[in-house]
Amino acid sequence: MSPIVLFSFVIGYFILLLGVAWFTSRNSNNDSFFIGNRNSNWMLVAFGMIGTSLSGVTFVSVPGTVGGSGFAYFQVVIGYLLGYIIIAFVLLPLYYRMNLTSIYNYLQHRFGMFSYKTGALFFIISRVLGATARLYLVINVLYLFILKGMGVSFEVATVVILLMILLYTFEGGVKTIVFTDTLQTTFMLLGLIVCIVFVMNNIGHTFGSTLSELGEKGLTRIFDTDVNSGSFFIKQILGGMFITVTMTGLDQEMMQKNISVKNLKDSQKNILTFSIILLIVNFLFLLMGGLLYLYGSSKGIQVPADDLFPTIALNYMPAAVSIIFVIGLVSALFPSADGALTALTSSFCIDMLGIKRRNDWDEKTQKRKRLIVHLVFTIIFFLMVIVFKVINDKSIIDFILRLAGYTYGPLLGLFAFGILTKRKLNDGIWVVIVCLLSPLLSYLIFTFSEDIFGGYQIGIELLVINGLLTFLGLLLLSQKRETTQLAGNI
């Protein structure tokens, strides 16, 4: 199908998003941008968060993993469910009780300014790296399969897509994203289901026969019982749980949507509903991967794992299905990028610039500062995507999960120490040093784990190790509190 025709549908889809953004951002202010005036509908947030959580990585990479590791990724997904339960009943009550706009204000109240700034800084680093890695993956697919054929360079393609995202998030922020994410999740799931139905019919399979053939080939196996394996099921489930707690519960991007809901009860309903739907959707992506493997084998298609879905969708499917795939892919791209831009802007303005603490800045001045920060982060996104293009790491999903173990570990340690202990932390530069040393020590343990532990491979549990090292370091910097008040209630 003509790349120009495909790209015209992308432009049309963007115009639709821009219209939604214009409608929802009318009469918006800084509170609209940061927390949606705490007036978001919990059902819209729950549905829209599916698109944000899955992103283009899930849309492209997860189906591609089935040929090599079967349904083993579902071990991590089970862990996700446990993590969302912890978020709903431990973290959300804390955030609502303290009426937080930035969740990292908790660290300021609990420990002090050094811990607060450190936590916010680690979020900014984590989200910039993670969001741009995801962004690179999808932009690269659009470039290789559509824009390259139009004679458009990768750099220009990146600028165009980021400009699109910038335009519809510039004013409304969270207030707009709640609605655009809902729209984009709808199109993403539509693209997934249409592709499943087409491939299943094309190879003459039903749902049951598909699972039966995949089972015969050993591709429906979920649980890895090899203790020394990096994908051992207990490690994967616990790792998935802790990744959810940190990458959702301790992540400003994800939580600013949750705390934009009217009250705690509705926010908890949002998280629990969303977690069940996410379980089902991830299974569908794995099923799609199995179908692609069967289809690709029958056609003799041999391409890298991340290219399997787009190759089949754009070269072997009817034009209408190809269009739906592209819209679904773009719908997976935008929620992760627009939410990240908004959350980074919010965190930098609130946590670093202290926009809420500056009595000398009126609403107009605050808005001007916010718009400048938003634009700067867009430029940073562009530069990082170009860096990832140079690196060109195809194992992008493993890279992101590994990256999370290093950058989110100190956040996990800080929040865990604050919530689980009553001790008073000697807030200062040593907190920063501990949070920097923990990822470094974790890297060394990961690198030499097989030599140190007799063949044992550290996998997704790297995040837990990193958080534990941070926790122990903070313990050394702390002393007993004289008050009997629970630490998590401060």
Image: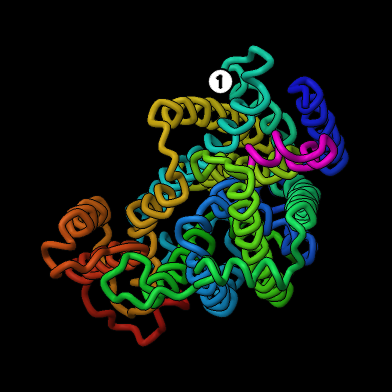
Location of residue 252 with respect to 233 vertically, above or below: above
Assign the C terminus to one quadrant of the image.
bottom left
455 or 442, nearer to the observer: 455
Q: Residue furthest top?
A: 151
Task: Tell me the magenta residue range.
Answer: 310-325
Picture quarter containing residue 476?
A: bottom left
Q: Residue furthest bottom?
A: 484
Residue to which mark 1 is pinned: 154
Location of residue 40 with respect to 346 vertically, above or below: below
Residue drawn at 84 percent across, 44 percent down? 24
Give the residue type that dot 1 points to.
Phe
Location of residue 190 with respect to 314 vertically, above or below: below
Residue 200 included in the magenta stretch of the image: no
Give how far across and how far down residue 207 sits, in percent.
74, 68
Decide: few, some or many residues near mark 1? Use Cα within 10 Å; few <14, some 14-19, many ≥20.
Answer: some
Give how far across and how far down residue 109 sits, in percent.
43, 64
